[in-house]
Amino acid sequence: MSDKDKLILAESAEALKNVDKRESSSKAPWYFANGFLLFWGLLFFAVVLPFFNKLPTPLTMEDAKRNVFIAERAYNNLYNLSNIGNKLTGSKENEVDAVNFLLSELAQIKANLQEDIFEMEIDVSKATGSYPYKTVLNMYRNVQSVVVKLSPKASNSENYLLVNSHYDSKPYTASAGDAGFMIVTMLEVLRVIASTKQTLEHPIVFLFNGAEENMMQASHGFVTQHKWASKCKVVVNLDAAGSGGREVLFQSGPSHPWLVNYYKKYVKHPFATTMAEEIFQLGIIPSDTDFRQFNMYGNIPGLDMAQITNGYVYHTKYDLSSIIPRGSLQNTGDNLLELVRGLANATELNDIEAYKTGHAVFFDFLGLYFVNYSEATGKSINFGVAGAVLIFIFISMWRMSAVSNASLCNVASWFILVIIVQIISFVLGLVLPIVVAYGMDAFGLSLTYYSTPLLVVGLYVCPSLIGLSLPITLYYSVQRNEKISNAYHLQLALHSQAVILALLVLAATAYGLRTSYIFVIPLASYMISLAFNLLTTLHDRSYAWTGVLKLSQVIPFLYSSYVIYTFVVVLTPMGARAGSASNRDLYIAVLAAVGAVLSFGFLIPLINAFRKPSLVVLSLFLVTAISLYLASSTQIGFPYRPKTSGQRVAYLQVRSKYYEYDGTLSKDFSGYLFNFQDRREDTPLKGTKVNLTGLASIKSECEEHMMCGLPLFDYRYVQNRLQSKFLKRDEPVQIPEPPTTLTKMAKTNINATTVRLEFNVTGPTYLSLFIKPYEDVTISGWSFLSSHLAKPPTAPLPYHIYITHGIDITPLNFYVDLTKADGDFDVPVLQLGVSGHYIQSPGDEEAVKFASSFPSFSILAQWPAIYQRYIF
């Protein structure tokens, strides 16, 4: 090497050192770096959480003269309704006491009716019917609903608005939140409208239905049979997946975006997101609502709203009126009252089909403002923002080239390298929380955050931030370029993040996902900040542009963290009732990762504008390590707490009997069938007083016997059967009255190859029939829903007829037609099982003693059940 070359190299090295010194001097001190991240964390706790939990001041009886929704009166009704106790369909509490409560309140409302303005009709209806749902044919007999029609005398409209909720309960809960809350809200809304001299254009039907918890039976009965159903054009459905807080709009339409316009116009306290609608329709939420029935069987569009806060008490004995704040009633009451008035005056009800067009994109911002636009408009916005960002990025790179005296190709080559690094960061930001979730599950440590939600930050958010920050920080620690400054390189990293989001927006929009708006918000904000910096000299003044960028990301940070937190609030309690087959930690991990990418995607690279950014990465590693220790090695990570966040333990006190073809009893055994609700199954119960010695999987029994030879209660028991376990007991389970019986009444030859078997079945309110022909036999007809035969169950499942009785329990007579090619019916042709469930019975003495041995954090749902299998 010549002396001249050595001199050039030395000068270049010295120039790089000078550049490094100048850029280092322009960076903020290292001790501000962690404070930078801490600021955004504090912003979440100081702004997002208060607005998420904000409720209006509840009105008292002193305000009653104003003809507004009175939370105090609604709360008093809720207290009385929930104090009736468990309102199980078919029970006295549901069929008599709850109905009488409603009729009494309705009588008071009618007594104060503005008779010159309204007419009010009350109908206590009964319905009997059936329909397929999940793995069962859902059959109901004499289920009740209380239906009220409020008609304006000044109008002759035959187009009704339907408002629906349910008053029945799941077993062992007073159901104050689900959905007594909505029932009393409807009563109060009806009271205010009926007593006010403010007329309406259309009649309103208030449906207080008494059988929703059994797979939405009463709403099906109403929409397919009731005299007013055919005139109902729009429905506002009200339900709950929690108790207290604000109600969220999570389904609209379908294909009627104008409904969301009315929501925006009339709702005082908006809380809604298209993202919830699309996630719910994916089936991730282990619940369903009556909204399904109105859409599917009545073709009635509408709005579906539900409470979501404190899902820990949902369907448990702790769902009491005492935990529901009056402000929550005021919030929902204010919204519902104005929304119902608005829709009851909507001209769209006159010709509902004329307004059936497309879908809506909608969301609220911290409950302060509601945004909605059509799906078509959303596509234009998405494509426009993505295209504009790419154009501004090109202009920015051109400016960098001009200012740095580097060719555009040189800048572009560095940009490609930075994009690769940023893609790695993006992928790691999404993958690392999932790795943690898989790892925790592999060690039997699922749901460690269940009672300590703050652990989500350390277990999932911090690993995501590590993934987002580590590659780009390593890159900046090694890259050297005397022409393109580190400040420009940092801009290239943010441009890379924008390109990734833009591509996601384009792909999601092309796929038809309206949820793509959540990517557009941070992307549009970045576009605005980039445009401002390009229009000024800030773009080229070292790190001066970062101030505008930080300011522009405040709104995206607040919104992204707000909407993701909403889903964490919803899905965290659901993880303990979604069954043991799925790892629900993955859902929380993915949510945390998406939240981190959306909230910090344009912020986390800015740690490189501080000195020693590696200290931030090390701090994130430290927080993650501490969280892993707390989750795995301390009581903080134990998921369950008494009362506030218990473990749901569902099991049946089983007695099973197998009768052979000749009528002899071949097997009679008893025990406890556990349908574990969460991933940890029986692990938390080990070391407690409950004796589970001998608890074993029933998988082999399911492979050998029809329906595992056990009284699987509903589709949840069926779907989770391979994860269920059985604990034998020596003493036979004592089955309460009335006895469950199946009697063959007749056998009639229809023709040479077909025979009809007629049966009679009696028993308690809840019965199931399991019907399975032998391989060379087909069921050619039966007395149940004929169309259900066209869709045979997936092998090895039999047909499952799930039967619920409402106000009357009468014997069920049915027949099955069997066809066999050789016409030989003097051999076994059919397995028929019957199960009876005595849900409100505590069971025999031994069962009561067994139940009392569970720890205080256990929330039991258990009852006696009998299964009898016959061969004909």
Image (cartoon, rainbow, N blue to C red):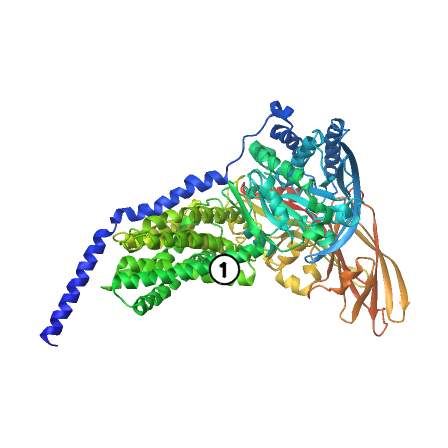
Residue 254 lies, in percent from the top left, at 65, 53
Against 637, residue 485 (above or below) is below
**Where does residue 350 sit, x and y in percent of width and height?**
73, 46
**Residue indicated by mark 1:** 383
- Quarter of the image for residue 134 reads bottom right
* Residue 765 placement, left or right of 489: right
Residue type for callout 1? Phe
Q: Residue furthest bottom?
A: 1
Seen as rendered, the residue at the extreme top is 62
Q: Quadrant of the C terminus?
A: bottom right
Lateral position of residue 738 relative to residue 236, left or right: right
Query: Observer-nearest residue: 292 or 620?
Result: 292
Instruction: Indicate the secondary structure of the residue bearing disc 1.
Output: helix
Q: Is residue 79 visible?
A: yes
Judge whether 711 appears above or below 267 on screen. below
Q: Which percent across, then down, holds residue 793?
A: 71, 63
Examine the rendered structure and indicate whether residue 66 appears above or below residue 180: above
Nearer to the camera, 433 or 191: 191
Give the answer, above or below, for where 312 lies relative to 20: above
Quadrant where the N terminus sits is bottom left
